[in-house]
Amino acid sequence: MESNSSDYLKYWRTINFYYRTKNDLSQAEIDTLLFLKSEKYFRRRKFEEFDKILSWNKKRFNKLIEKGWIQLFRGIGGPSANIYELSMKANRMLNEMYRKLNGEEITISGKTPLLKKKISYHSKMYIEMIQEMNQVIRQQRHRTHE
C-alpha cells in the first residue's frame, strides 16, 4: 500500500468499519476524534466547531467523555472553560488506524466483534475485504524483500 501514495486511502472504508465496529463508535465519533487528534488540548468550543458539520447530536461530547475517548485535562471553572484532551485509548486507536493505512495488517482474533457467532452478511463481506487487504500487504512486503 505504501508503494503508490495516490491510493493511500484505498482501504479506508474497510479500516474505518473495522475500528468503528471494534470500538462501538459511530462515523461521526470517529470523524470527531480524527479532527481532535492534532489538537493537543482543546476546549469544548473547538469540539463544537467541528461538530457543526456533523449530524446533530447534542450528547456526542458527553458520550465521548463517558466512553473514555475524551478526558478532562484541566478544570478551570465551567464546562466551556475546561480544557480537554484525547485519552490514551483514543490516541492508541487513531495511531493504529494510521498504521493500518500505512500498510500494517489487521489481525482478526476471536475477540474481534466482527467474529460474533451470528454475524451479518455485511460483516462477512468486510471480513473478506480485510483478508484481501492483508493478502495484498503480504504480497507487497514480499516483493520489497526480493
Image: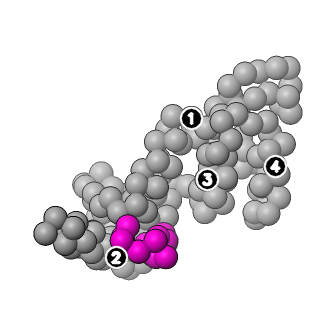
- Of pointers 4 and 3, the one earlier in the residue sequence: 3
- Give the residue at mark 3: 34
Number of residues whose C-alpha sits closer than 10 Å to that of mark 1, classed few (under 14), some (14–19) or many (20 or more): some
- Give the residue at mark 4: 48
The residue most toward the front is 146
Q: Position of residue 1 (x, y in %)?
A: 36, 70
The residue most toward the left is 146
- Of pointers 3 and 2, the one earlier in the residue sequence: 3
Measured in 3D between alpha carbons, the distance from the residue under mark 4 to the one under mark 3, in whole angstroms, is 14 Å
User: What's under tag 1, amino acid-wise?
Assistant: Ser
User: What's under tag 4, amino acid-wise?
Assistant: Glu
Number of residues whose C-alpha sits closer than 10 Å to that of mark 3, classed few (under 14), some (14–19) or many (20 or more): some
Please say whether residue 9 is one of the residues in the magenta stretch.
yes
Judged by its main secondary structure, the magenta piece is: loop
- Give the residue at mark 2: 129
Evaluate whether residue 120 shows in this view: no
